[in-house]
Amino acid sequence: MSPQRESNTAAQGLLIKATEVHRAGDVNQAESIYREVLNVDPQNNQARLLVGVLCAQSNREVEAADYLSTVVTNEPQNFSALSWLAGVLGTLERYQEATEMAKRALGIRPNDVNTWLHLATGEFGADHFEDAAHAFKRVIQLEPRLLTAYYGLATTFLKLGEPLKARLVMVDASYVSSNFETLLKLAEVCLACDLWDEALAATDRILRSDPKNIEALMLKSRAYRIGQQEKEEDTAIDSIVRLAPDDFRTPLHRGRRLQGVGKFKDAEHEFLRSIELNPHQGVAYYSIVSGRKVTSEDIDLIDAMESLARDEGLSEDDRAHLEYGLGKAYDNLGDYGRAMAHFDIGNRLMSQMRPWTRRFEPEVMRHQFEQLMQIFTFEELRRPRAIPEWPVEPLIVSGIMRSGTTLLEQILSKHPEIGAAGEQQLWQKSEHKCIEFQRGSYSMKQLMAAANEYCELLTGIAPGRRIVTEKNPANRTAYGLIHLAFPTTRILHMQRNPVDVAISVYTTMMRTGAPFMGNKDAIVFALKMHKRLTAHWHEVLPEERFRIVSYEKLTAEPELTTRDTIAYLGLPWADECLSPQSNQRTVATPSLWQVRQPVYTSSVERWRRYEQWLGPFAELIE
């Protein structure tokens, strides 16, 4: 027998032995024998493949990639090597190579589930979200019970700015398995859609089986906060404190709740406690500086934030909080150039991490606004109609975000006859049910159903009040629907210098929000379109039902403007309206600190402090 044949025979015998050991579960011994095979026969691709697989299974991806790549070079049609290599390269974040290997493998076996999953992971990692969604859908078609694919598809839809599609995926996943992980993810996605009641339903399913599940309780607390269910939020926080007193997130929940009712010193104590429990975070630092004015005495705090922001191991979410916090700190200190540099970084990070907000498409916004103006014309809105009898009269306080809507609601809700509902989502959820954009019309039946639901919502939040404010800035696109449903209701539209609005939007951290946030050019476009839509509503809505309130006038002449507004509403004067800072209702918007101060004018023409760094915002100067 020739030496080569002897070598091959020996290698084959070792492979048989290694396979038996491998099947018996002794992977270390199996790998040792596979490597012995390679010593005997360096060209043995089967042994090389199996060593690569064992390396991949034991988190040695770099070594696995070397072995598997050699097999693919020697045997370009080796399906197993291609598929495993695709998975390994994805783990190593070499996404383009991973997708290439996965596609080659699928050319050999088109219906292999694991390879489709590797392809989906690679496409997602490369930010090819449309392709990733296609691949995850294919995985689900091939293996409908694979929860990993549902989680991946839902996350992909969030990245595509399609949170409602993500919700549907997670609802399907909950039918496959109602395990805690699935229900927690479902609750998270529902919160991204502002469906706080559905998030509560998901967390309740967990808590019925595991009443001490801290993750579910924390999501439940968030849901109650979004839904303005204050007593229920307090109960949830009490449970969190009792079960997890040393979890750094616990004082964050307590601190946010305290900030919402204006107890900023107590809130700061909670945030400092959170930092003690976990110094490697940004949320608590941001919460401290957002709850008061930063002064030169806070240099140690600023130094700590600067140092932490340079930590490469920090998550993007924590870094974003730090960047906005540092921007706010330097703004307070009058160092506007340094402030804008931090805000630039914060906006970039938040744009990447705000996946639940749909992508901003300027022409889509333009087309939508033009359709609204074509549907809700002067003639359509002024036609005589029967006036329905409703148990409550909504008072719409709206306008573009950061225009002073929270301040005006705080002023008005001090009146004994006016309740406050904060920001609700009903009209945004109902708009596409009520308006048939393709046909250029609306459904009165759907509108009346939405109006009835709206009344139930408002009376539930402010029982016993005849008039209830609602201040979601997004309602500015629903003025036509609201007027048709409630012909006697009044709309107070806040108007503020657009450059100040732009600066305020850009320098305010919001986890959720309009799709144009985070990009200066997009903000400029949106504000121009907003101005155009506002002019339309001013023209077509009756003067006695639509009034523009100037932020600048409200802050410069608060008593005169407030008296004028109360008279416009047909209500008797109430002195309480002159002290909105003492309003005890919970505030959950980014203005929670500002509205607890006496009315001030320092935010008027704030843009001048940033004049050197306006960039595209300069187009808005009037």
Image: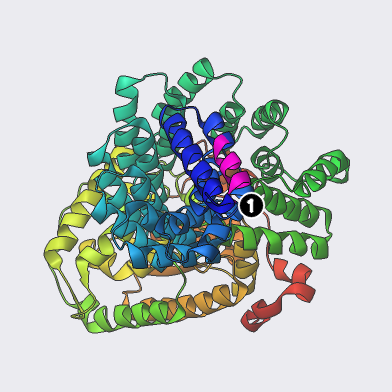
Q: State the residue position of label 1.
A: 599
- Say what secondary structure mark 1 lies in: loop
Q: Position of residue 147 (x, y in %)?
A: 33, 43
Bounds of the magenta segment: 33-41
Residue shown at 48%/35% (left/top)? Answer: 18
Q: Is residue 356 visible?
A: no
Tell whether 526 sits left or right of 481: right
Q: Nearer the viewer, residue 456 or 154?
A: 154
Q: Is residue 519 left or right of residue 444?
A: right
| Relative to 374, 360 lies left or right | right
**Residue in front for this viewpoint, 73 or 432:** 73
Residue 304 x %, y %: 82, 41
For label 1, the crowd category at 10 Å Cα-Cα, with few meaning under 14, some 14 to 19 and many 20 or more, is some
- Looking at the rendered image, the quarter that the C terminus falls into is bottom right
Q: Nearer the viewer, residue 282 or 59?
A: 59
- Main secondary structure type of the part rendered in magenta: helix
Looking at the rendered structure, the kind of residue marked 1 is Val
Rendered image quadrant of residue 69: bottom right
Seen at 57% across and 55% down, the residue is 43
Q: How many marks?
A: 1
Residue 106: image location, x then y, percent: 36, 64
In the image, residue 264 sits, relative to residue 89, either above or below, namely above
Q: Nearer the viewer, residue 355 or 455?
A: 355
**Quarter assignment of residue 263:** top right
Q: Residue at x 42, y 65 (%)?
A: 77
Q: Is residue 210 magenta?
A: no
In this view, which residue lies farthest toward the front? 1
Q: Is residue 338 left or right of residue 92?
A: right
Residue 295 shows in the view: yes
For the rendered model, the colour scheme is: rainbow
Q: Residue at x 32, y 32 (%)?
A: 179
